[in-house]
Amino acid sequence: MINQNKTKSNTCTITKLLLTWLQIGFTSFGGGATTQYLIQEQFIYKHKWITDEEYANIIGMCQITPGMNIIAYTILIGKKLAGAIGILVSLVGLILPSAAVTIALTTIYTSISKSPKVHSALHTVFAAIFGIALATNWRNVQPIIIKNYKREHIIFATTLVIMIGSGIIYILLNPPVILLYVLGGLCFAVAYWYISKKEVKVNK
């Protein structure tokens, strides 16, 4: 069943869903960070088919699954907006144009890969992609920070500690990513338990 918004112009149809993913598939040069940015632009800000908080939840669920996260995002968004047919349409729209463009660019690159000018240009591209990745990650984490800021101070503080601490631990110790997810979840569980315990005392 197609997910529909209040305004008719923003109604998500199968055709619109396919065209949106085709546009993302044809223009997502730069890999995962660019694709995420385009997904945010189309689904959250342009069409308003999902909210930034819903997208943050989708990211959270996909981070604990193995494999390509972008494919997982595509499946969950397609399922949310149009059910099983939405999954199929979303995957086709994203993968087919991306695969075609990748094959074409790979063919071209093999013939010019030894050129110093090409390597210099690629270094510049990497810098641009890094900038897009920063903007994308900020959009991903912003709704989480804002939501937790409006809650208890301990929840907001726990959020910041997990974000900064996870980065430091990963750089210094390079543990399995799943371990950081588990530790982060435990920290939040303890924080929520503390708040609920405090609320019970106040209500008494």
Image: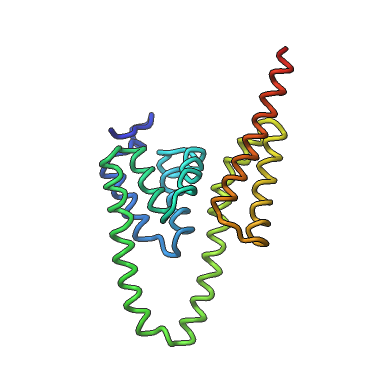
Q: Position of residue 144 (x, y in %)?
A: 59, 40
Is residue 204 rendered to the left or right of residue 114?
right
Q: Position of residue 67 (x, y in %)?
A: 41, 55
Q: Considering depth in this image, is 26 or 170 the residue closer to the camera?
A: 170
Residue at 34 percent across and 43 percent down: it is 78
Q: Position of residue 135 (x, y in %)?
A: 56, 55
Relative to 48, is 36 above or below? below
Q: How is the structure coloured here?
A: rainbow
Is residue 13 rendered to the left or right of residue 198?
left
Splitting the image into 4 quarters, where does residue 156 fall? Answer: top right
Relative to 109, is 174 above or below? above
Relative to 4, is 37 above or below? below
Q: Considering depth in this image, is 33 or 159 the residue closer to the camera?
A: 159
Quadrant showing the N terminus: top left
Quadrant showing the C terminus: top right
Q: Residue furthest top?
A: 204
Is residue 56 rendered to the left or right of residue 150?
left
Total numbered badges shown on the rendered structure: 0
Residue at 34 percent across and 38 percent down: it is 81
Relative to 85, is 117 above or below? below
Q: Considering depth in this image, is 48 or 151 the residue closer to the camera?
A: 151
Residue at 31 percent across and 51 percent down: it is 91
Q: Position of residue 62 (x, y in %)?
A: 45, 47
